[in-house]
Amino acid sequence: MLTYSERAKLCVNLTAKRLLQLMDDKQTNLALAADVTTKKELLQIASELGPHICVLKTHIDIIEDFDTELITKLQRLWEKHNFLIFEDRKFADIGNTVKEQYQGGIYHIADWAHITNAHTVPGPGIIHGLKEIGLPKNRGLLLLAEMSSKGTLAQGEYTQKTIQMALDNKDFVIGFITTRQIIEDPCFINFTPGVQLAAGNDTLGQQYNTPTNVIGQQKSDIIIVGRGIYTTPDPIAEAKKYRSAGWQAYLHR
C-alpha cells in the first residue's frame, strides 16, 4: 500500500497533492464536520481542533451571522494549523446554475473553499460547470458516490456511473464521499462520514461506523466526525481519540 505522501506525488490536482501531503505531515486523517450556526462556534472549533485535523468541513449557508470577516479569520486559522476547508455544499443542478452558485451569491465559495462536493444526478455537466470555476483556482471536487444514511439511493448503478465521471475528470475530481474505497486509484481520496468510536445509529437514520473498520477494513482514507467530538465535554480530548484511532488504523493497514 502506498503512503499518503507517495500518493500525493502521483496526483495531478494540486489540492489532492496538498491534502495527502499534509495528512502525512500532521499524521491525521480526521476531518471535523462543524455543523454549527454561528461565527463564534465555527471559529472556536477551528481554533481549538485545527491542530488535530486535516480538513474542516463547513455548511456556510447555516451560519446565521455570516460575513466576509468570518472567511478572513478562517483563513488565518487554516494557515496557522495546516488544514483545508471543505464546504459541504452538495451541488445538484445543471452546469450553468452551479457555476453561479459556486462563484457568486453572498458566499463566493470558490474563493475560499479548497474542496467542495456535488451529487452526480444531473450528469457530467455539473462537473464541467464547477470545473470552469474551480480548476483555475486549483480547487478540488468530491463526488457523492455513497451516503451513510439508511435507505440511501446512492448505491449500485449510481455509484458506478459516479466513478466513471470521476475518471473522466481526474484533473478536478479528487475523490468521493463514500463508505469505503470504491476504486483502487491512489489519486482518489475517500471521505467517509458517519464515524463514531462505537458503531450504531441515531434516530434520524444516520448509521455510524468505527474508525478501525472504515480505515482498516473498508480502506477509506479520511474519517468525518462531527457531533461525536464537538458536543462532548472535552472536544480536544475526544478529537485526539479519533485522530489516534484513525491514524493507527491507517498504519496497521
Image: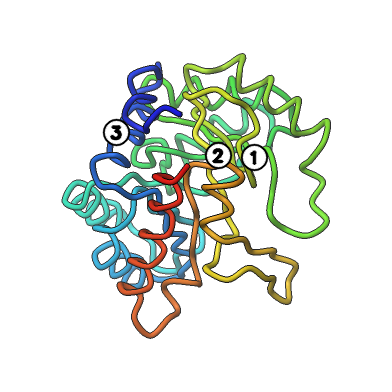
Residue neighbourhood size for the residue with mark 3, other residues' Cα within 10 Å, grouped as few (<14), some (14–19), many (≥20): many
- Residue occupied by mark 3: 21
Report how far apart the C-alphas of labels 1 and 2 lie in the structure: 7 Å
The kind of residue tagged 3 is Gln
Labels 3 and 1: the sequence-earlier one: 3
Report how far apart the C-alphas of labels 3 and 2 lie in the structure: 21 Å
- Residue occupied by mark 2: 117
Report how far apart the C-alphas of labels 3 and 1 lie in the structure: 23 Å
In-image side of 27 versus 172 (left or right):
left
Vertical placement of 192 versus 22: above or below?
below
Question: Closer to us: mark 1 or mark 2?
Answer: 1
Residue neighbourhood size for the residue with mark 2, other residues' Cα within 10 Å, grouped as few (<14), some (14–19), many (≥20): many
Query: For numbered disc 3, what is the local secondary structure?
Result: helix
Question: Closer to us: mark 3 or mark 2?
Answer: 3
Residue 209 found in image quarter: bottom right
Vertical placement of 23 versus 130: above or below?
below
Labels 3 and 2: the sequence-earlier one: 3
- Residue occupied by mark 1: 144
Residue 164 found in image quarter: top right
The kind of residue tagged 1 is Leu
The kind of residue tagged 2 is Asn
From this viewpoint, which residue is outermost toward the bottom? Answer: 233
Q: Are marks 1 and 2 in contact (CB under 8 Å)?
A: yes
Vertical placement of 13 versus 21: above or below?
above
